[in-house]
Amino acid sequence: MPASATKALRVAVLADSDTRWKWGALTAQRVTPTDAEIRLDGYLLRGRATPTARQLNEVGVRADSLREVTSVEFLRAMSEDAENPYDVLVLALVGGAVQAMLHGLRSAWGSGSRPVVVTGYVGVVYEKLADGLLLRHGADLVLANSRHDADRFRAVYEGVGADASSVTEVALPFLGGKPYTGEHQPYTVVFAAQPSVPDSRKDRTYLLNRLIQHARKHPEREVLLKLRSKPGEHTTHIEELPYQKLVQGTDVPANFRLVYGHMGEVLDRTDLLVTISSTAALEALHRRVPTVVLTDLGVREVLGNHHFTGSGCLASWDQLDAGHRPAPDEEWVARQGVAADGSYATAFDAARERIAELLDREGGLPPLNPYYTPETAPGYLPGILARHHLGPDGAPLPGAPAADKAPGPVRQIVRRAARGAYRHGVQRVAPVIRRMGEL
């Protein structure tokens, strides 16, 4: 009898940023049986992008428990729980951290009972395809957010002789909301900002100025700059030049303003979504909100907007100022897992079935088996593991932080202070030093 029919499923999500927590927690809910009772435990990997309470609230996903951990603390928790393992573990991490956790978990669990391990990507995969995929190899399911991605993922794994059976086609877990039915009053244009794209002051200032100009040319419209984080907070990518700072001292029209909050709620009132390459474009296309991917700075891999070639969404600010309305290519949209045709409800069926099969596998699951090993990548893997205080065999290195005991109250206070200082250095001090070096 399936595990889901006999007991509540215990699911853990390990995430290293607000965006990945959102993806991981929602993925956990999507890929588990729809009729199952689920206990969701969240673990936030300590680092520069550990989400703040405000960011977690904005994501809007609730867990039964949520705590911050180091890599070694997480592995210890999984080892201590070996007698009563989770059913499903979602690794919502950057590729190197996924690889480190796969080796660390293999060492911690050995050949004993273990959960089904799931990983994947938060959004569009437009860079480091082979590198990121091979770092994720070894999980039971590597989720592909579209048919297009699933084909590419399998080609990479098969091309290096790695098992590709883990690749499972799904869709982005945070799609949803009511379909767009027509213009609002007032007509609302939303620019979805990204923390690191583009990355130069010149380009970001250009985009800001064009947005403000659009507001001036169309005073009857409401023009919103949708921001991901407030100054001092980090997301998946470092934002060295927040738009909040760039707009300071600028004379802006009354119909222009900055907004925060849940992207889905902003899309509820959006008539035109504009971005460089944000995953918000896919959210908007799913709801059939008119969507534009800007070409002003070129169509380039470094910007990620090359992913949208063939979409029918590429346009410039000059075209938008003149009243251009994009018409997405339906075939392109269908291949990107956007599921604007109403098929979203079944997008996760294959993943649910695969997980159910693995949970019911006679004799339990075999040890994790990543493609990278000390034999296949002796010059690469040890460095990845060492960054997480793990040795070549995946076991914690001697002297690894909190390898032997849980942190006490004093250590927790010191950690919070140190993390605050680190974040300040990354976002405030380091950019200044870099700019001085360019003088």
Image (spheres, rainbow, N blue to C red):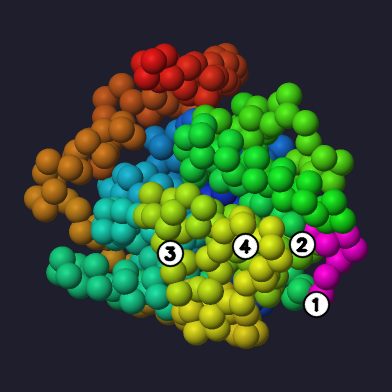
Q: List the residue tagged with mark 3.
A: 307
* Crowd class of label 3 (few under 14; some 14 to 19; many from 20; radius 10 Å): some
Q: Amino acid at mark 4?
A: Gln
| Residue at (58, 66) in percent of width and height | 282
Q: List the residue tagged with mark 2.
A: 270
Could you tell which of marks 3 and 4 lies nearer the N-terminus?
3
Label 4 residue SS: helix
State the extent of the magenta-drawn residues as a range.
Answer: 181-188
| Cα gap from disc 2 to disc 3, whole angstroms | 23 Å
Kindly report the secondary structure that dominates the magenta region of the rendered protein. Answer: loop
* Crowd class of label 2 (few under 14; some 14 to 19; many from 20; radius 10 Å): many
Could you tell which of marks 4 and 2 lies nearer the N-terminus?
2
Q: Amino acid at mark 2?
A: Thr
Q: Amino acid at mark 3?
A: His
Q: Nearer the viewer, mark 4 or mark 1?
A: 4
| Residue at (57, 16) in percent of width and height | 417
Q: List the residue tagged with mark 1.
A: 181
Q: Amino acid at mark 1?
A: Thr
| Cα gap from disc 3 to disc 4, whole angstroms | 20 Å
Q: List the residue tagged with mark 4.
A: 319
Which residue is at the front of the view, 32 or 377?
377
Q: Is residue 264 visible?
A: no
